[in-house]
């Protein structure tokens, strides 16, 4: 497979295969997963980054336990819509995954996802700074995936 347009993703998946969402950070990868109806995204796991092959193995193991068939990666587009080094890094991550496994990957604009999640954790959940550090990346992955799922529903 390859990197595909988000709207083409469902046609490439088994009807009830969940989708995984990723928030790629420098030190961690936040992972979220959809339900089998692809209506709701749930925070799943935080992968501490080390070597790419180890990171990919951890991701693929999570996908296999959930029966996930595709990936949505948050694309950190600049506020002006341009793509900088972080976008290039995300695209390279996707290319490297495709060298290891044949699966559909789509991107979703993740602008403001971490900021929005932090705001929710501070303002609404009153979560401590230490606990926020543990939660923000996997919750940002769920935020990214939920946005993509909503886009798939509205076409």
Image (cartoon, rainbow, N blue to C red):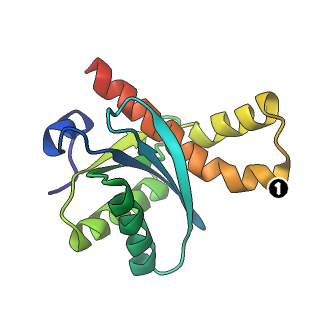
**Front in this rendered view, residue 19 or 53:** 19
**Front in this rendered view, residue 85 or 116:** 116
At numbered mark 1, what does the secondary structure look like: helix, strand or loop?
helix
Q: Is residue 42 left or right of residue 36?
A: right
The correct choice, above or below, for 23 with respect to 79 in the image is: below
Q: Position of residue 146 (x, y in %)?
A: 45, 33
Image quadrant occupied by the C terminus: top left
Please report the residue visible at 57 percent of the width from the left and 44 percent of the height from the top. Answer: 140
Location of residue 93 (image quadrant): bottom left
Look at mark 1 in the image and give the residue it sits on: 130
Q: Is residue 42 left or right of residue 11?
A: right
Q: What count of labels does the image hold?
A: 1
Q: Is residue 90 left or right of residue 118?
A: left
Please report the residue visible at 38 percent of the width from the left and 60 percent of the height from the top. Answer: 65
Q: Is residue 12 left or right of residue 18?
A: left
Q: Does the image show residue 26? A: no
Q: Position of residue 107 (x, y in %)?
A: 34, 45
**Front in this rendered view, residue 98 or 90:** 98
Please report the residue visible at 36 percent of the width from the left and 59 percent of the height from the top. Answer: 63
Image quadrant occupied by the N terminus: bottom left
Location of residue 45 (image quadrant): bottom right
């Amino acid at each position: 497979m390859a990197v595909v347009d988000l709207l083409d993703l469902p046609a490439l998946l088994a009807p009830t295969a969940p989708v995984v969402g990723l928030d790629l950070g420098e030190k961690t990868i936040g992972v979220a997963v959809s339900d089998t109806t692809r209506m709701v995204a749930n925070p799943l796991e935080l992968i501490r980054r080390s070597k790419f092959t180890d990171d990919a193995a951890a991701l693929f193991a999570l996908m296999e336990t959930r029966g996930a068939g595709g990936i949505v990666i948050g694309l950190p587009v600049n506020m002006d819509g341009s793509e900088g080094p972080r976008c290039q890094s995300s695209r390279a991550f996707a290319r490297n995954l495709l060298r290891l496994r044949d699966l559909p990957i789509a991107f979703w604009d993740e602008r403001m996802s971490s900021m929005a999640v932090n705001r929710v954790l501070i303002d609404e959940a009153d979560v401590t700074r230490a606990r926020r550090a543990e939660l923000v990346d996997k919750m940002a992955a769920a935020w990214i995936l939920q946005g993509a799922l909503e886009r798939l529903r509205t076409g």
